[in-house]
Image (cartoon, coloured by chain):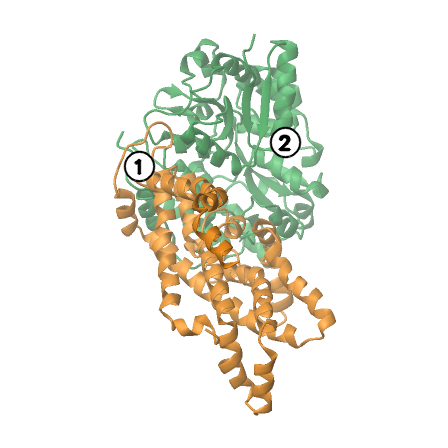
Chain colours: A orange, B green
């Protein structure tokens, strides 16, 4: 048996490569090729028709002095941090609540939570046009006015535009993240929790010292997923603001700005430069996660 | 005989039906062998697809129904992707028969690159029932001062008069003889006039005589379902296509309750009217792609659609636009009273205003300028959160450097 295993590991490298080749082909076709073309485009002149010529890093240099670009960076980072913080906080609470509730209704409730995440973002944004409607919108009618506040023009007032995008993203992802965290909570070893309870450890300490380390790898996955999605946010804000950032560019995100450069200004090179400039910002956010204590993310048993 | 079908890109489903009908009409009257593949896209989707098609030179159309706003995008370089139609237009006398202001719209330098479908004259669409309720008549609105005065009286009865939209800025500026771009490409050449115009819009909104819709735009079905349906406004400013298409499509329940009147005039310091009673905004035209292999066939079809009486009449009757082709102004079908507009004759009103429709200064930065205005760049003034001079200064600065390094042509 041991000889068979050794044989299969050492003598069939080509076979394994052949089996893995569809994956590499897929990556080359749909990831590496567009990426390479994008880089190439960002180094070419903004020619909408006819041959372009090489301009080096001029588009990137132009971005450094472009106020709207920095506004888009600031908005995107604010949007990402806020959305991730609120979504993950709510998801943790919701996952705990679901974990404690009657098991027969846990399934349907979890599914109901997940529905917004399963909806196409464009369809969700169309629904949110009604939610954010100035006077007749659900948010104003059901929340803002009953609380005694003046109605808010969520899609036009620069003070609230970014909040509207955050609310939409939180609505979309909280349920989905709840599902992942619920799975992680269910995977906790019962014996550890029982032992802690018998030893009289307070609930908060049980959460911070046992539960949190146990679900840490899932938390890490959720954080990375949300951060990447927030940086790539486009469809939702496109439906709400028509590809712009709304009044005063208050909701201008990086992908929307890339769209404007390419499809409104006719500058594909500039648009590609904005798109690719997202990479360092996104990598920076992920690096912040990587700089946090590695032991924590590996979970208690690692 | 046509070698292959002419591919026509259209920017709405409604217009696709019109062009399919026109293909059949052309086949029956001119060329029975003519074949066309009419493809419809969304209004915003089509320019995006077109830009990609031109950039990659893949799956390009032969004829494109392109809005003048997006047309400007292709003027960044000296060479445009469109066929120079100057000689063909001159040969069939279309240069005399199409309203010059509209033909200029699709002209770049001395080259005619497209033919305008619509007159795009701006009027005010008002609610007859609400006018009756408040004892108003269109003749009371001779000047913008009249409108402001009456509007403030209505506010005391908690009624706003005019729906606001950032795109009004360009319309009002043109009505006063101003322009977004000078002939030399200067942005807002008459800056003080622009400041005064935006200030006026700010005053309209701040006094609530003008009501900003929830999405800050009148080009939105939600606007009709909310502000219009709830009688929160009594009037909307818009071009012919706005009334024929959007108002009829999104407020069918208000058939017969709408009326049409010319814009109020601007006045000088003595209160004397000194402007025309109309303006212009957007509107589509037909262009031919330079790389097309069926340029002649495409041109013949465009010429037919632009000059055939039935084609012009149907464009109006099917809710697209009022033609800019002057011989069509005499077609009785275009001058009939329309039940939807309370038996006002949109055609007669538009023909009366046609000669006054102002020119639009075409510029490669125009798409970005319109986009920035439409999508809220100047809304802060209407929300009372900024002054007109600061907003327009910022608008001008951002427009001057909206792109990366130019092509260098």
Position in image of residue B161 (x %, y %): 58, 50
Frontmost of labels 1 and 2 is 1
Q: Can residue A246 be seen in this view?
A: no
> Which element is circle 1 on?
loop
Q: Quadrant of the N terminus of chain B?
A: top right
Disc 2 residue crowd, few under 14, some 14–19, many 20+, Cα 10 Å: some
Query: Which residue sits at x=68%, y=75%?
Result: A101
Task: Please state the chain letter of the residue tagged with numbered disc 2 in the rendered image.
Answer: B
Instruction: Determine the image quadrant of residue B371.
Output: top left
Residue A148 picture location, percent across and down: 60, 72
Nearer to us in this view, B206 or B181: B181
Disc 2 target residue: B14
Residue positioned 53% across, 25% down in the render: B117
Please indicate, yes or no, whether residue B239 appears anywhere in the rendered image.
Answer: yes
Which residue is at the far top?
B1
Measure the alpha-carbon separation of dots 1 and 2: 38 Å
Q: Residue at x 70, y 43 (%)?
A: B254
- Chain of residue at mark 1: A
- Residue B348 in percent (x, y) is at 60, 27
Q: Which of A77 and A297 is in front in this view?
A: A297
Which quadrant of the rendered structure holds the C terminus of chain B?
top left
Out of B75 and B321, give the one closest to the viewer: B75
Query: Residue at point 39% right, 71% down?
Result: A294
Residue B18 locus on image (x, y percent): 63, 25
Mark number displayed over residue A44: 1
Q: Are marks 1 and 2 in contact (CB under 8 Å)?
A: no
**Left or right, residue A20 beside residue B329:** left
Residue B266 vertical position relative to residue B408 in the rendered view, above or below: below
């Amino acid at each position: 048996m041991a000889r068979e295993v050794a044989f299969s590991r050492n003598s069939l490298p080509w076979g394994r490569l052949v089996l893995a080749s569809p994956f590499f082909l897929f990556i080359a076709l749909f990831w590496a090729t567009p990426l390479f073309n994008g880089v190439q485009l960002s180094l070419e002149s903004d020619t909408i028709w006819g041959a372009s010529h090489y301009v080096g890093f001029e588009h990137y240099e132009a971005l450094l002095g472009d106020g709207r670009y920095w506004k888009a960076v600031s908005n995107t980072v604010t949007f990402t941090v806020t959305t991730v913080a609120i979504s993950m906080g709510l998801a943790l609470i919701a996952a705990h609540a679901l974990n404690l509730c009657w098991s027969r209704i846990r399934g349907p409730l979890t599914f109901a939570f997940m529905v917004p995440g399963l909806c196409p973002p464009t369809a969700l944004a169309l629904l949110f046009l009604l939610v954010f409607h100035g006077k007749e919108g659900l948010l104003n009618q059901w929340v803002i006015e009953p609380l005694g506040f003046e109605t808010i023009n969520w899609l036009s007032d620069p003070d609230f535009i970014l909040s509207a995008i955050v609310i939409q993203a939180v609505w979309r992802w909280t349920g989905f993240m709840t599902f992942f965290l619920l799975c992680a909570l269910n995977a906790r070893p019962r014996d550890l929790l029982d032992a802690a309870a018998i030893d009289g450890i307070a609930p908060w300490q049980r959460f911070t010292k046992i539960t949190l380390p146990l679900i840490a790898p899932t938390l890490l996955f959720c954080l990375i997923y949300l951060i990447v999605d927030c940086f790539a946010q486009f469809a939702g804000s496109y439906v709400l603001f028509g590809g712009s950032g709304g009044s005063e560019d208050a909701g201008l995100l990086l992908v929307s700005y890339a769209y404007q450069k390419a499809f409104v200004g006719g500058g594909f090179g500039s648009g590609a430069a904005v798109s690719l400039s997202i990479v360092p910002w996104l990598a920076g956010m992920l690096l912040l996660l990587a700089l946090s204590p590695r032991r924590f993310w590996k979970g208690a048993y690692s | 005989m046509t070698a292959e079908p002419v591919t026509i890109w259209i920017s709405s489903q409604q217009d696709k039906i019109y062009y399919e009908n026109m293909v059949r009409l052309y086949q029956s009257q001119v060329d029975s062998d003519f074949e066309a593949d009419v493809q419809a896209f969304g209004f915003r989707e089509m320019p995006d697809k077109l830009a990609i098609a031109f950039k990659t030179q893949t799956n390009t159309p032969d004829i494109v129904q392109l809005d003048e706003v997006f047309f400007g995008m292709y003027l960044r370089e000296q060479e445009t992707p469109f066929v120079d139609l100057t000689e063909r237009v001159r040969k069939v006398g279309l240069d005399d028969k199409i309203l010059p202001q509209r033909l200029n719209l699709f002209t770049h330098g001395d080259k005619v690159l497209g033919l305008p479908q619509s007159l795009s004259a701006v009027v005010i669409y008002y609610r007859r029932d609400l006018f009756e309720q408040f004892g108003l008549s269109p003749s009371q609105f001779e000047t913008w001062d009249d409108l402001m005065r009456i509007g403030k009286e209505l506010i005391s009865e908690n009624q706003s008069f005019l729906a606001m939209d950032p795109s009004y800025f360009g319309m009002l500026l043109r009505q006063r003889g101003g322009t977004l771009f000078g002939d030399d490409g200067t942005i807002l050449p008459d800056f003080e006039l622009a400041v005064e115009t935006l200030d006026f819009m700010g005053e309209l909104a701040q006094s609530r005589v003008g009501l900003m819709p929830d999405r800050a735009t009148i080009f939105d079905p939600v606007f009709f379902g909310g502000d219009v349906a709830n009688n929160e406004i009594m009037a909307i400013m818009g071009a012919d296509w706005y009334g024929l298409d959007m108002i009829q499509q999104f407020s069918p329940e208000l058939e017969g309750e709408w009326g049409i009147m010319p814009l109020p005039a601007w006045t000088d310091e003595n209160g004397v009217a000194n402007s025309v009673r109309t303006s212009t905004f957007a509107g589509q035209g037909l262009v031919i792609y330079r790389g097309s292999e069926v340029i002649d066939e495409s041109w013949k079809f465009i010429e037919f659609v632009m000059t055939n009486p039935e084609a012009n009449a149907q464009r109006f009757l099917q809710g697209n636009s009022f033609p800019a082709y002057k011989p069509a102004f005499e077609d009785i079908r275009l001058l009939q009273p329309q039940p939807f507009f309370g038996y006002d004759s949109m055609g007669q009103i538009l023909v009366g205003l046609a000669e006054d429709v102002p020119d639009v200064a075409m510029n490669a930065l125009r798409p970005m300028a319109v986009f920035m205005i439409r999508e809220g760049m100047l809304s802060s003034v209407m929300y009372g959160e900024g002054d007109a001079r600061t907003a327009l200064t910022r608008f001008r600065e951002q427009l001057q450097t909206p792109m990366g390094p130019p092509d260098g042509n």
